[in-house]
Image (cartoon, rainbow, N blue to C red):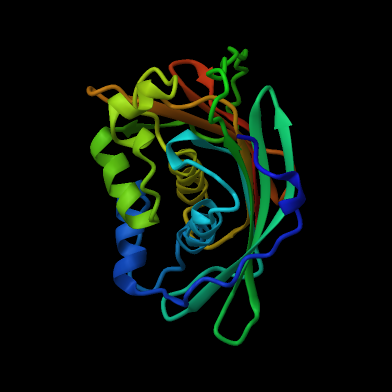
Amino acid sequence: MPIDPSLAGRTFPATEPYDVTEQAVSDFASATGTPYAPGDPAPATFPIVVAFAAMQGLMRDPEMGIELQHVVHGQQRFVHERPVAVGDRLTATLTVRGLRQIGGADVITTSSDITDEAGVLVCTADATLVHQAGAAPRRWRSRAVSRMTELTPSTYAVTREALVAYARVSGDPNPIHQDPQVARSVGLPDVIAHGMYTLALAARYVDEQLGEPGRIVELGAKFTRPVVVPESGTQVEIEGTWRDEHTIALRVTCAGESVLGNPVAVVRA
């Protein structure tokens, strides 16, 4: 049944405070293969841990009528006021910005303000969720890939074990990322990587290219094609080029197909 569009504009209660510990940041970095040393800022996509707790509040609300296994992440954008650091105590307040129907699927646009213990904004996490209950499986279109060579390309292995580890540290239990039978039951070819895992690899790439963590101010992309992860695993290739002195345009592909739409990182000088 379609989600009631009158729920647009609704703001959900703030999440329980989340204490950012050294262990939590280290585990998150490890799950995404991001280099990390004690005292470093958290990876740029770490706020999803708090933001996803807010999304869980939305998805579990009986008025929303959302079934987790029928949800895919359509788009994500982070805008950082400052990097997240060990010792922060964070909460997220989610607002439903929009609800619409496309091809029988519910498209839910949300924005989560992530604040510290003093109520100061640390990061804004904007997300688009696609709820496909009762909808035909999405047809993913092939996209031509143009090469960009100004930054050194990197290739990252993606395994099912890595997805299990990411699910644990991010708090995202959606079974389409771990259980092939569930994934196939909702029209997917196999287990797929979390869109946020792929975006975390993009953040890792930027950090590695810059040689310094904590410089990403803004990071966002559309999740245009799933990264299918067979039992033997797969690879994600990332390339980038400087658009200007603060902006890196990225190209993220798997098996020669673009998997993120318009992925861009804005960095501090």
Where 66 falls versus 101 (above or below)? below
Q: In which quadrant of the rendered image does the N terminus lie? A: top right
Q: How many marks?
A: 0
Residue 192, image x, y percentages: 39, 29
- Left or right of 246: which side holds 170? left
* Residue at the spot 65% in from the left edge and 36% down from the top edge: 2
Question: Hey, which quadrant is residue 78 in on the image?
Answer: bottom right
- Left or right of 99: which side holds 146? left
Residue 184, image x, y percentages: 36, 21
In front of the other: 188 or 68? 68
Q: In which quadrant of the rendered image does the C terminus lie? A: bottom right
Question: Hey, which quadrant is residue 93 in on the image?
Answer: bottom right
Residue 5, image x, y percentages: 74, 45
- Left or right of 39: which side holds 146? right
* Residue at the spot 53% in from the left edge and 30% down from the top edge: 133
Where 153 falls versus 199 (above or below)? above
* Residue at the spot 76% in from the left edge and 58% down from the top edge: 9
Where 153 falls versus 80 (above or below)? above
View extreme (bottom): residue: 118
- Left or right of 36: which side holds 51? right
* Residue at the spot 68% in from the left edge and 64% down from the top edge: 11
Query: Is residue 268 visible to the viewer in this orientation of the structure?
Result: no
Query: Is residue 261 visible to the viewer in this orientation of the structure?
Result: yes
